[in-house]
Image (spheres, rainbow, N blue to C red):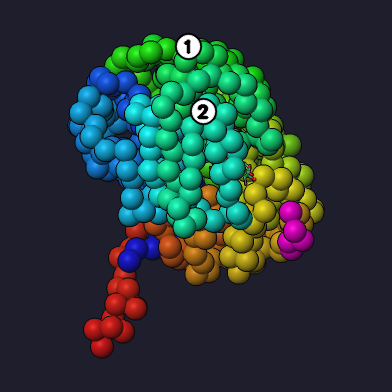
Amino acid sequence: MEKFVINGGKPLHGEVTISGAKNAALAIIPAAILSEDICIIENLPTSISDVNYMMKTLRQIGAGVRLINNSTVEIDARHINSYIISHEITKHLRASYYFIGALLGRFGKAKVAMPGGCYLGPRPIDQHIKGFELLGANISIEDNAIVEATSEKLTGSPIYLDMVSVGATVNIMLAAVKASGLTVIENAAKEPHIVDLANFLNSMGADVRGAGTDVIKIRGVPQLHGCTYSIIPDQIEAGTYMVAAAASYGDVLVKNVIPKHLESISNKLIECGAIVEEYDDAVRVMLSRKPARCNIKTMPHPGFPTDMQPQMAVLLAIAEGTSIITESIWSNRFRYTEQLNRMGASISVDGQLAVVQGVETLKGAPVRADDLRAGAAMIIAGIAAKGTTEIEDIVHIDRGYEYVVEKFSAIGADIRRVYYPDSDALDTVG
Ligand code: UD1
């Protein structure tokens, strides 16, 4: 087993380079099977485990996957020979369900086990299913565990999403690009990775318009071809380093970003008293005095991202005064506050609200990463705190942060990955 050990209390200084966007990669990798051709994907975060599981899935169904370098992969989708994806793979990550849309789009059939991923509250897929059905697919769910989708012929359709869903928007786009006729997704998600997916599909010859607005129009094309495509930088990884810079009273240049994607995060940091300088493809974050309080409400893009909520809570935990965080996307995304309180934070949770009373300083403690972004928050807290913090369950963090120890160390954090024996395993041996 592994844990992170952090000796905190040192300001972060220097430059960090952001990797390709995890959530864009997780949509683009399955999208590549829609062409019976070869795609080269650049700026891919190949070291994170979620991306690795997606590449394993491709291999399992017969695609060729070749690592060209640390951030470039060639996907050869010409010889895919299966439309079935087992629970062994899907249990590891949420985005495995994008293979339903992609396999349906490619073969008119898909059999995919229900997905795993971070527990943030119930994660229904009713809107995905509604979209597939409106395109003409028959959907059955075996034992609440395996989704089977079949269709003689997918036909474009208007699809209104009852709530803004990133996953449903992606899955419907994947199923619709080769359907005959026009699909119009209304109340679509507008996240940067939706635009990235649309750009990738269009590079393969698809006709997708309006991505980035709440109406996406997809005119089906009979065939897609291979392409070379570079994934956008990761908005949430960038935001994590930006908040870490502020929470440690540091000065960090966060490079390889699209500043426009970071506006909701930059604005909140500025409200807290940080200086945020924007360059063409970098942002510099500095904070030299105690942060000011501010309120946060998570919203679909371009609102404040729910995936930055735990990290931002760390900054508010050491701010002057009391801040209110409203989580409006997920029903159970405050579990990490218990861990922060162990480090001396003063946060009380009431349903979808967290009341954060700023304290003077956090103190190092043994904590755990409840999920991916909760884990990122624990790293920031460990860096900001006085003393030593040990974070367990870091497997969650490895799902979404590339070279996290190397990147934080390079800007002055004292963070190490430490191997320790699994106590359950020792018990069994004993
Ligand atoms: C994606 C992100 C995740 C982020 C979330 C919200 C990926 C791989 N994951 O998750 O990191 O936290 O967007 O920005 O990109 N809902 C339904 N029915 C559905 C689908 C969704 O009720 O069929 C609800 C969900 O329960 C949730 C809300 O809609 O309350 C948003 O979910 P959604 O945008 O689909 O999140 P994911 O795509 O799972």
Discs 1/2, front: 2
Quadrant into which the N terminus falls: bottom left
Q: Residue 44's spot in the image, x, y percent? A: 35, 31
- Which quarter holds ligand 1? top right
Above or below, 368 relative to 95: below
Reply yes or no: does residue 351 show up in magenta.
yes
Residue at the (24%, 42%) spot, across then down: 60
Residue at the (42%, 43%) spot, across then down: 148
Whether residue 235 is visible, yes or no, is no
From the image, tell me which residue sits under label 2.
136
Majority secondary structure of magenta residues: strand
Front position in the image: 367 or 389: 367
Front position in the image: 73 or 60: 60
Between disc 1 and disc 2, whose residue precedes?
2
From the image, tell me which residue sits under label 1.
207
The amino acid marked with disc number 1 is Asp
SS at mark 1 in the image = strand
Q: Is residue 350 left or right of residue 386?
A: right
Instruction: Tell me where the magenta segment starts and ends, as one range.
Output: 348-352
Q: Is residue 422 left or right of residue 137?
A: left
Above or below, 6 relative to 192: below
